[in-house]
């Protein structure tokens, strides 16, 4: 990982320190901690890659997109590119003492599998608390990924040709397929928020709306606009969203804009009015009222708390 950024959120770009020419790194939480200065570990960071963490033991609290999640044995976290996190910490504010393994991988590393599309989507679930049987299955899958990653790291030979070079290539290909299998296992997990499966009535409409919302939230929060783009009536769109999440399409659109506002307030030095304009508000006062209604804080107050 490479750190950059400003006083608020730290940008972390993918950069495998093992210098393997592959888009994945497998490491323990304890191996990650020495890389980070204590001040960095306590501050929010924004990733440009996927991060999957399976907790095998210990306790801590993680933050993802300004929502906290308790971490203990059986916790599974999945962060997508662009999401903001604070690494799991203990009661003293320092990095937690966790027995956990992390998979860091670029968006183009997993094999292109239709079954994993929703897992990799930017609006999929973030955290699961796994029962013992599901934890054991994912732990076995992660352990196999760990072993193959170590084999790839240990077998690398600069400029290798012949059997050694071919073995490295095959191991890298196997890592991609093992990651794909793990993501399929994650796709089979029940949604922690109780959202319906993709095959449930109305789920297709809801997913289409969420994908369109992810592309267009900065330009419109109008349910009528989204309904027209997707070819559904506003009532159908709202009914599908209520069935899937308990929230209306308008509430989901507003929540997505508020999340982006939070990210920009924490991450950039942009004036509040400029952030409001970037999200479609012509008047700073209207943006301030909207943000306070959605988050319970003023934009300036939120920015101060994050920093």
Image (cartoon, rainbow, N blue to C red):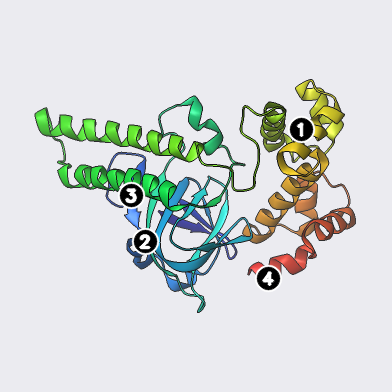
Q: Image height check: is 69 above or below 185? A: below
Q: Is residue 27 left or right of residue 241?
A: left
Q: CA distance from mark 3 to mark 2?
A: 10 Å
Per the image, the residue denoted by label 1 is: 240
| Mark toward the viewer: 1 or 3 | 1
Q: Which structural element holds mark 1?
A: helix
Q: Name the quarter where the C terminus is drawn.
A: bottom right
Q: Which structural element holds mark 2?
A: helix
Give the crowd class for mark 3: few <14, some 14-19, many >=20 residues within 10 Å: many
Per the image, the residue denoted by label 2 is: 32
Give the total of numbered labels: 4
Q: Which structural element holds mark 3?
A: strand
In percent of width and height, residue 210 lies at 69, 35
Q: Is residue 278 visible?
A: yes
Instruction: Tell me the residue at 69%/50% (across/down).
Output: 260
Q: CA distance from mark 2 to mark 4?
A: 26 Å
Q: CA distance from mark 1 to mark 2?
A: 41 Å
Per the image, the residue denoted by label 3 is: 26
Instruction: Tell me the residue at 89%/57% (across/down).
Output: 285
For residue 9, which quarter of the picture? bottom right
Foreground: 15 or 142? Answer: 142
Looking at the image, is mark 3 or mark 2 earlier in the sequence?
A: 3
Looking at the image, is mark 3 or mark 4 earlier in the sequence?
A: 3
């Amino acid at each position: 990982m490479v750190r950059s950024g400003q006083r608020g959120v730290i940008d972390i770009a993918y950069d495998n320190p093992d210098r393997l020419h592959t888009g994945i790194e497998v490491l323990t939480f304890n191996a990650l901690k020495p890389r980070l200065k204590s001040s960095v570990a306590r501050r929010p960071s924004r990733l440009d890659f996927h991060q999957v963490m399976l907790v095998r033991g210990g306790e801590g609290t993680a933050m993802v997109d300004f929502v906290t999640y308790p971490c203990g044995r059986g916790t599974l976290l999945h962060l997508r590119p662009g999401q903001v996190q604070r690494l799991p910490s203990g009661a003293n504010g320092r990095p937690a003492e966790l027995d956990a393994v992390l998979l860091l991988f670029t968006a183009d590393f997993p094999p292109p599998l239709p079954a994993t599309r929703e897992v990799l989507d930017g609006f999929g679930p973030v955290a699961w608390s796994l029962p013992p049987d599901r934890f054991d299955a994912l732990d076995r899958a992660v352990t196999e990924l760990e072993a193959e990653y170590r084999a790839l790291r240990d077998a690398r030979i600069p400029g290798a040709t012949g059997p050694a070079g071919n073995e490295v290539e095959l191991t890298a290909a196997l890592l991609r397929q093992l990651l794909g299998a793990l993501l399929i296992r994650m796709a089979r997990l029940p949604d922690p928020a109780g959202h319906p499966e993709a095959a449930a009535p109305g789920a297709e409409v809801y997913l289409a709306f969420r994908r369109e919302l992810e592309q267009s939230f900065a330009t419109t929060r109008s349910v009528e606009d989204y309904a027209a783009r997707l070819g559904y009536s506003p009532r159908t769109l709202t009914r599908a969203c209520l069935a899937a999440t308990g929230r209306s399409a308008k509430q989901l659109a507003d929540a997505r804009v508020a999340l982006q506002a939070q990210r920009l307030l924490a991450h950039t030095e942009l004036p509040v009015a400029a952030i409001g304009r970037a999200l479609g508000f012509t008047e700073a006062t209207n943006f301030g009222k909207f943000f306070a209604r959605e988050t319970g804080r003023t934009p300036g107050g939120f920015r101060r708390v994050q920093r």
